[in-house]
Amino acid sequence: MMVGVGGALWTAALLVPAGLFATSTGTPGAQGSGKTRWIRVGRLDDLAAGEPKRLQIVADERDAYTVTKDQTLGSVWLMREGNAVKAWSAVCPHLGCSVDLGSDKKSFSCPCHTSRFAISGKAESGPSPRDMDPLEARVVDGFVEVDFRRFRTGITERKEA
Ligand code: FES
């Protein structure tokens, strides 16, 4: 009897973390798997049409054994167009610095090696090997959600990290 109870507890101890992993909606470590990870970043009404705004990505990080609450995973640039939103990763595709809004407020620029990007995210000058990395965005119940992903830097191709 004692062996049966001990065996059941042992099996449960192994299955609970596996269950947590299986029900995860995605983690930064899982990126590249193609899984979406919609993260709510703010209210649509807080975005002015045509004015880019940077918001932080804050979410729980999960692995097979733990959940760490409210971790800052990065930031994104958002721009409202009517009731839709465009989103780009704020990570510079060159070497990973954080892309700022240009001084004209109608472009993006990277302070590290002076890459410049059009307001559409298109690379215009500097060493960035590609355009800013676009992210999927949607509006749900008045909130903007972003399918947050990270990409490799320093390469022409857009590949998830
Ligand atoms: Fe942005 Fe080099 S990291 S231009």
Image (spheres, helix red, strand yellow):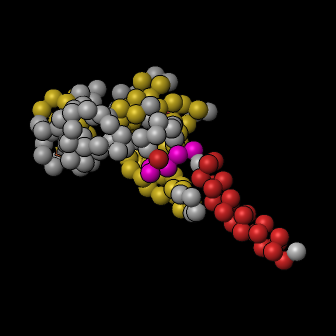
Q: Magenta segment, principal secondary structure?
A: loop
Q: Please determine whether, in this image, residue 65 is positioned above or below residue 153.
A: below
| Residue 90 shows in this picture | no
Q: Which residue corresponds to the image point at 53% horizontal and 57% vertical from the top-left?
A: 63
Quadrant position of residue 109: top left
Q: Is residue 75 left or right of residue 30?
A: left
| Residue 127 shows in this picture | yes
Q: Which residue corresponds to the image point at 66% horizontal and 53% vertical from the top-left?
A: 19
Q: Quadrant of the N terminus?
A: bottom right
Q: Which residue corresponds to the image point at 63% horizontal and 47% vertical from the top-left?
A: 23
Q: Is residue 43 left or right of residue 47?
A: right
Q: Please determine whether, in this image, residue 70 is positioned above or below residue 151.
A: below
Q: Which residue corresponds to the image point at 13% horizontal and 42% vertical from the top-left?
A: 114
For the record, the magenta segment spans 25-29
Residue 9 locus on image (x, y percent): 76, 69
Q: Is residue 27 magenta?
A: yes
Q: Quadrant of the C terminus?
A: top left
Residue 54 locus on image (x, y percent): 36, 43
Quadrant position of residue 5: bottom right
Q: Is residue 28 magenta?
A: yes
Q: Nearer the viewer, residue 16 or 73?
A: 16
Residue 36 locus on image (x, y percent): 51, 37
Quadrant position of residue 89: top left
Residue 15 locus on image (x, y percent): 68, 59
